[in-house]
Amino acid sequence: MSRAAEDCCCRRVRPRARAGFAGAVPLVLVLCGTVRVAAQPVADDPQAWTVRIAADERVLWLAQVGRNDSVLFYREAGGRFSLGRRLSGLVADMAALDGEVLLFFGDGGIYRCRPSDPSASPQADLPGQQAPVDVFADEGRIYAIVPSPAAAHLARSVPSPDAGGPVTTQPFEPGDAPLSIVGYDGRAWTGLSPCPPNVPAASRAGLPPRIAVARSHLLLFWNADARDHIHFVVREIGGQQWRTGGTFGVSNLTGFWPLSLGKVQTLAAAHQDISGRAAVTAFRLLGSLEDDPASAWVEAKLQLSQPPAGVHFTDYRQAFGFGQHLGLLAADAAGEHYLQFARLGEPPAEPTLRVRDEIAGTRATEISQWTFQLGTLLLLLLVFTGLFTIRRNSMVQVVHLPPGFERALHLQRLAAWLIDFTPFTYAAAAALRLSWREAFASLTGWALTAGIETSFPDPPVLMWWGLSCGGYVLYSLIMESLTARTVGKVLLRCQLLSESGGRPAFWQILARNALRLLELMPPFWVFAMLVVLSRNRQRLGDIFARTVVVRRVRRADRSTGRGVRGEDRKPRPPDRSSDER
């Protein structure tokens, strides 16, 4: 394993080791999640860092590469970039497949990253930790162009001449070809084919050859000496020889990249127009590769997203396929990086993005998230301090209720809460014109993973939850102050009492509803378990407000032997001395 790979592993583990330092309060850590140290971007000066891009149908990956390390971001279509993951090492190339990304470090280390996993898992290195010239991902497999001396240390798979026979391996022999194509299946690298001997490692213009896979064929593209042609050859995977494909004529060529766009193989060629500005031409593989590969390609008409006002792109540095969009990593004369998008025959749904702004947005989000986590931790410590000092006996000590009253059942409390709270969620969703189901799913997903790798939910979702909770708490405060009940409690035949047995004082109702706002915050939903764990079936607000939700029951009348309902007896007045204690 390379030094960068070892450092990367160690760096990934350190935040969790720091979180484990609070082992004395494991319950607090379970409730609030890991307080994550912000991974700041490498630098604000665009000249001090470069950008690497990889994308597939679902996920776009962006690596900001500085002088000593890299920061990895990702986003889905129409979404925002995630919080950055700092990597100890310089990312030289990337390949996206099935929502994941393979990172190729400059020192030869190879890692796999997943959106849902903050760690980076090491993969098998190429012989001699050789960095690839180019990589391409297709159907869960990685294809790469490497120098032949490194490929000569690999084996190649040889199918059995008998149908269904075992596959054997033999040493890979690249011959006199300077470059070879190798493949990676997630377990090991194998040699596939030597490149034609006339394919250079880089043209005089500094353009490397490119590899692609389409319809069980290997496609190899390269530029020779002139900057106005792209040559390509075709070979069946497992075939014996390369076939001449043809030539693409593109004047003032500055770069070219094969990619998959809408599951159709596409070649994007960057060049400069007569005014010196960057332009791009796309060719789509729509015909057959069997008969005449050159005629199988058709030039496509692209509609590009507009650059920001006053910005002119002078160079396209990379192209990628992202869903139905062709993406371009563009740069202006000052070296500022942008993400520009294009579609075939219609305007793109993605706008042009300045990379620095997107990274700065993730930094602000991460600082907000870290501040929120710290505040959550402090609130948790405050709540637990109160539980174990002021109200330490509330969890085990049984409250003595007046005759004819029993503690409300768990299902009664849950049903009453749903009756009271649900109308506010519907009303808030209707006012904001959003789906309450989708909003609740987004909020729940954030609540379950907050503090690990997720950003805050979208502002409309937070506003929906804030309006729902605020309206519900105000309604509960008014109803309980007037009648010690809400509509849900009336329908479920429950009511609110003080622990002393009388009607709660206003300060008690105010306290329990103020704490209700805290309990409705997603990171504190776990406090709902107190209703189950407490001997008196009290939630957090009840414990600190010294209240209990009760139900009326029939009791036996000793003089007549008949049952008497609890409502035939009014609760005794509150014991003020008990409340003061």
Image (cartoon, rainbow, N blue to C red):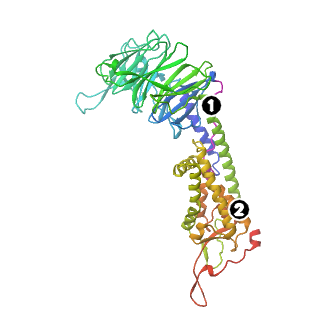
Left/right of residue 427 with respect to residue 394 in the rendered view: left
Q: Which residue is mark 2?
A: 511
Tell me which numbered mark, 2 or 1, is placed earlier along the sequence: 1
Q: Which residues are magenta?
A: 27-45
Quarter of the image with the C terminus in it:
bottom right
Q: Nearer the viewer, mark 2 or mark 1?
A: 1
Q: Are marks 2 and 1 in contact (CB under 8 Å)?
A: no
> Which residue lies most toward the left here?
162
State whether residue 2 appears in this view: no
Residue found at x 37% / y 21%: 297
Q: Which residue is mark 1?
A: 357
x, y percent for residue 475: 65, 61
Q: Is residue 23 above or below residue 555?
A: above
x, y percent for residue 141: 40, 31
Task: Please tell me how many numbered marks the rendered image carries.
Answer: 2
Instruction: Pick the residue in front: 472 or 158.
Output: 472
State whether residue 444 appears in this view: yes
Q: Amino acid at mark 1?
A: Asp
